[in-house]
Image (spheres, rainbow, N blue to C red):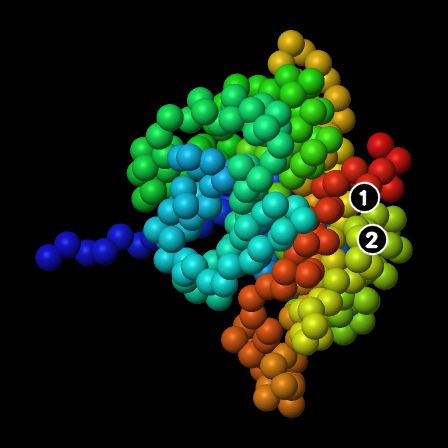
Amino acid sequence: MTTSPDRTVPLRLVLAGLMRRYQERVPEVGGILSDMIREGLIRHEREIENDHIAFRTMGVRHLGIRSFEKIFLHYGYEKREPYTFAAKKLDAYWYSPPAPEFPRIFVSELRVNDLSDEARRIITSYTDEVTSDPVDNLDLDDGAQVDEFLHRALWRLPTWADYAQVLAESEYAAWVIYNRYYLNHFTVSVHNLPEGYDTAADFNAFLERHSYTLNSSGGKIKQSPDGQLLQSSTVAEMIQATFKDGDVHPISGSYVEFAERRPHPEFAHLAKAQLRREHRREGFEAGNADKIFESTYSAQTAQRGS
């Protein structure tokens, strides 16, 4: 009788690799964590509950959600509700984790066929270099191999001209053409923080007091119609990106999100220390996510003065 492998081992390694590179690439993450420690919200970053992490993909053959989700489904995640973002030409799903200690996953996909002929031609000139589903070639029980895959090029380095032309039609598409599967954001669960910081409004005040720029699309706090899920985010940091032929230009990188999940009405009487993840509002909200996507869009990054 063979013993089933403990898939939390490679999952932990993959998540650690994602967060390590994300923090290296987005210095603001370290700044926020340091300010939280200095102000006494936490003693160590390990105390933060990561509400969810998010990835962006291209809806083309061999890639997209159908390919990417295989990684986390293998680790015990369960596929949940779908979401559609008509104006942005996006579809998405979220995935619940195998245990509460792990973050939820949110994966979106660009409907490439809904773009103009020229944008589609440019995008597929890159993505057509992927001739089979790359996830099928991975040993998903080898966390180091999966970690390396999530941070390697899937197609050739884009030219600045191609990037700029795609950017003019879909800022999401341009982000993916350059950034691929880099972690788009991680999310601090603010409701678990000390009183005075444990609501979206309070935590936003903390962030702005420390001079972080917040995504203002749809308001700095995006709230679900039921009033139970409140989200905010920083504006993506600009990175100096090197394109083919050595062209260097500032482009949108990644950002940090913050979520307040309020208790379901039947659990509202519980003391804060008694509340667990299952007592709070679950899932996501399309209206909130639609505006959070814009954390990497030029209308928001312009606020940074970059």
Residue 220 image point, x, y percent: 81, 58
Q: Secondary structure at mark 1?
A: helix
The answer to whether residue 281 is left or right of residue 133 is: right
Which of the image's four quarters has the N terminus? bottom left
| Residue count near mark 2 (Cα–Cα under 10 Å), binned few <14, some 14–19, many ≥20 | many
Name the image quarter holding residue 172: top right
- Looking at the picture, tell me which residue is in the foreground, 96 or 29: 96
Residue 245 image point, x, y percent: 64, 9
Residue 128 can be seen, yes or no: yes
- Looking at the picture, tell me which residue is in the foreground, 31 or 69: 69
Contact (CB < 8 A) between labels 1 and 2?
yes
The answer to whether residue 275 is left or right of residue 69 is: right
Mark found first going from the N terminus, 1 or 2: 2
When the figure is inspected, residue 47 is found, relative to residue 168, above or below; the finding is: below
| Residue count near mark 1 (Cα–Cα under 10 Å), binned few <14, some 14–19, many ≥20 | many
Which of the image's four quarters has the C terminus? top right
Kind of residue indicated by mark 1: Gln
Q: Label 2, on which residue?
A: 216
Residue 253 can be seen, yes or no: no
Residue 107 image point, x, y percent: 53, 49
| Residue shown at the point (55%, 33%) measured from the top left | 180
| Residue shown at the point (69%, 19%) measured from the top left | 160
| Residue shown at the point (56%, 79%) measured from the top left | 279
When the figure is inspected, residue 157 is found, relative to residue 305, above or below; the finding is: above
Name the image quarter holding residue 229: bottom right
Q: Label 1, on which residue?
A: 300
